[in-house]
Amino acid sequence: MGINLNNARTILSDLESSRSEREDLYKHFHQIPELSMQEIETSARIQEELTSYGIDHELVGETGILAVIENGEGPVVAMRADIDGLPVKEDSGKDYQSTATQVDKNSGAEVPTSHACGHDVHLMSLLGALKAFNDHTDQWSGTFVGVFQPAEETAEGAGDMVEHGIADKMPRPDVYLGQHVLGSLPGGTVGTRRGAVLSQAFSVKVEVFGKGSHGAMPELGADPVVLASTIVMRLQTIVSREIAAQETAVVTVGSVNAGSKSNIIPASAELLINTRAYSQEVSDHIKEAIERIVRAECEAARSPKEPEFTYYDIYPLTDNHVEATDTVRAAFDEYFGDKAVDLDAVAASEDFSVIPRELDVPYTFWGLGGFEYQENAPGNHNPAFAPDIQPTLDRGAEAAVVAAAAWLTTSQDSSSATGSC
């Protein structure tokens, strides 16, 4: 198995002539970001584009889209792009920056929205790859599947597509591909990594209970503010004293809420905790330790009621298949040369692996450098996160095609010079 560079270059030969049109479409998507499970306009426009390309597609759930190009005998390669935005007000300074707002269906509040995680780059890369493969079917054989997934930001989208029968709607792929634009890679590069690449994560809301009293008479109550404070401090020992030094873990208390007045001891306090780990064993240990510490501190504080734990935003580990990753890296090395780089493990989390795990197929997920001046690049979810349009759009489409072409073309020109078109 190996990429045919001549075929890949031909498949990508329209990138220059389509550049202006793709940039305009990217700006359109950038200016209409929509919240998770609310991507109605985004989904409709993607479908409009697919129809104009002549590519068969169908909805999976309310906003997820499955696009399939069948082109004779051969492997089946699927690629995923997430399509949702974030409740973040953009402050990138771009002349096309988002000024959009949307009513959050969960809270009922109208919030500013933006593509502060770069999902507009991802969907444009997949649209570009689908069009390129569809326009040059004489250069490859097999089946290329595009999965436009909603609600990555809330860890709902991949599960929603599974619940709506994506496994029965698509041919079973030989490999499942994905990419993410990042500020941590040099602009225009593509970075791969074997094994764990994105962390496992979960969040938990912890409610602890006290006994209300006058602030001048604390002996008559049980103070949940002090209790919450001791829990915050004690939780810091999970990573520092319970996790082996060679492992990686993060435990963050992002919010503590209690009380409304300085001289009233409230009846309860709420903590919002987020965790990250690169193995199931470490994640399980963190979960057990949080509950153990919270319960012990509640008992020490004379809490009158057992604490309550509500788990949410649960993301699986993204653990790249070794052989699939090696295949993609070899194709990247041949095509991109020194623009193919190593990717360090990223502490962020994704629901990308949910669908390939459901399908029981190998997968690999790589990074795409989005900023020329990497030393000043904002991180994902930052209000200033808006990647350079070029070479990011071209590179994203190239990476999608080149990775898939490692399965969909047959290497016949191993002596060809390395480089991108």
Image: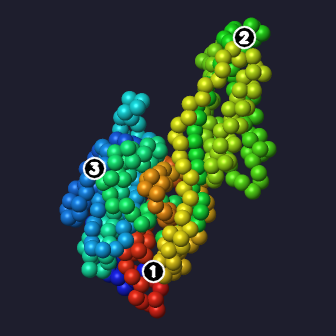
Q: Quadrant of residue 110?
A: top left
Foreground pick, 240 / 287: 287
SS assignment at label 3: strand
Amino acid bearing label 2: Gly
Q: Could you tell me which residue is drawn at 37 percent across and 75 percent down?
A: 408
Q: Report how far apart the C-alphas of labels 1 and 3 lie in the structure.
A: 33 Å
> If you read the primary sequence from the N terminus, does the residue marked by circle 1 or circle 3 appear first?
1
> If you read the primary sequence from the N terminus, does the residue marked by circle 1 or circle 2 appear first?
1
**Could one spot residue 265 in this view of the protein?**
no
Q: Could you tell me which residue is drawn at 29 percent across and 62 percent down?
A: 68
Q: Could you tell me which residue is drawn at 40 percent across and 68 percent down?
A: 400
Q: From this view, report whether residue 160 is shown above or below residue 393.
A: above
Amino acid bearing label 1: Gly
Q: Mark 2 — residue?
A: 221
Q: Could you tell me which residue is drawn at 56 percent across and 59 percent down?
A: 319
Local crowd size for mark 3, using a 10 Å CA cut-off: few (<14), some (14–19), many (≥20): some
Foreground pick, 183 / 373: 183
Q: Position of residue 163 (x, y in %)?
A: 38, 44
Q: Please state, as top left, top right, bottom left or bottom right, where the N terminus lies in the image.
A: bottom left
Foreground pick, 313 / 390: 313
Mark 3 and mark 2 in contact? Answer it, CB < 8 Å.
no
Q: Please state, as top left, top right, bottom left or bottom right, where the C terminus lies in the image.
A: bottom left
Q: Mark 3 — residue?
A: 59
Q: Mark 1 — residue?
A: 2
Foreground pick, 41 / 415: 415
Q: Report how far apart the C-alphas of labels 3 and 2 lie in the structure.
A: 56 Å
Q: Is residue 341 left or right of residue 128?
A: right
> If you read the primary sequence from the N terminus, does the residue marked by circle 3 or circle 2 appear first?
3
